[in-house]
Image (tube, grey):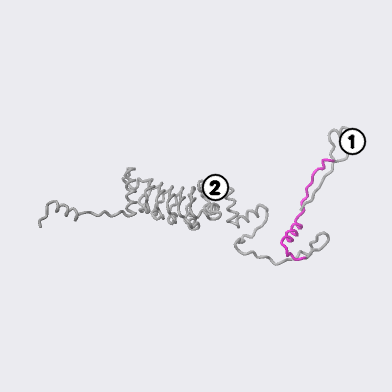
Amino acid sequence: MAWAPDHLARAFRHSTRVVSVPETALEISLRAVEDQLKICGHKRDADVFELFLSQKELTEVIDLSRFKKLKYLWLHHNKLHGITFLTRNYCLTELYLNNNAIFEIEGLHSLPSLHILLLHHNELTDIDATVKELKGMLNLKSLSLYQNPLCQYNLYRLYIIYHLPGVELLDRNQVTEKERRSMITIFNHKKAHIVQSIAFRGKVDASWNPRSPFKQKPAQRIPPDFSFANNVDKTVFDDPEDAVFVRSMKRSAMAITSLNWDTVPTREEKYLDEKGTESAQMLTITLR
């Protein structure tokens, strides 16, 4: 059977048809980076100071360590799950990762120059792991974590402020001095105890641990030389309030002396000489 020329041409095209292979996630990322470099006209990696890679449907990102001077990186509104592509970008100061699907941020601790970090609208659940990763960022000033599952934790905001004291703007709200004082009272019991003791001129046991169970001291008797209302009280301090009362009665007395203005003649009385020449009296009030 003889083949017609058109049949031969169709058979040849069918045998040489190229099957297209879908791009991998890293290939899509590489193409997005190369397209951005072309748009900005960068020919050398050393000239790249910023990369705009948002809204690219990225699920992974190629290693960006080749851009040594990269300072600004936009990756918001993608589909990222983690952050493993920032290893040696020590100059990075602003990182926008909001509106992704990130559930862990391992790797961010290697960004010492980071100043602004946006992570809102993600899937972060472990607040301790998140704080641990961010603790080494001494230059971090602005942080956003809202719309993450970890924000459901009780006292979430104060917890972040306590562990990241350098942050000045959290979730688009300025960190206030009142919040800083509150977080010390709640999370740093030892420091709060010392501050209150200094404020009231007392002494404090620096070894006090708020998490340790309360150890009640054995009951003590009142010293035999103490007497109140002419009765010697040597009962045991079963009630702590009794002990506080006894201690208050042993405090030094404080006397307040003031002029009794009722005994001071007015101008008219002086003129009429109604109160004579008696001297004014003094009033003394004694407090414990």
| Left or right position of 263 against 71 | right
Q: Inspect this view and state whether residue 101 appears.
A: yes
Q: Which mark is residue 274?
A: 1
65 in relation to 220, above or below: above
Residue at image mark 2:
175
| C-alpha span from label 1 to label 2 | 66 Å
Along the line of sight, the residue nearer the viewer: 108 or 288: 108
Of circles 1 and 2, which is in front?
A: 2
Percent x, y for residue 214? 64, 64
Residue type at tag 1:
Glu
Task: Classify mark 2: helix, strand or loop.
Answer: loop
Residue type at tag 2:
Val
Is 39 magenta? The answer is no
Percent x, y for residue 185? 60, 54
Q: Which residues are magenta?
A: 235-262
Residue projecting furthest to the bottom: 218
What residue appears at the point 17 percent right and 52 percent down from the top-left corner? 10
Percent x, y for residue 45? 34, 48
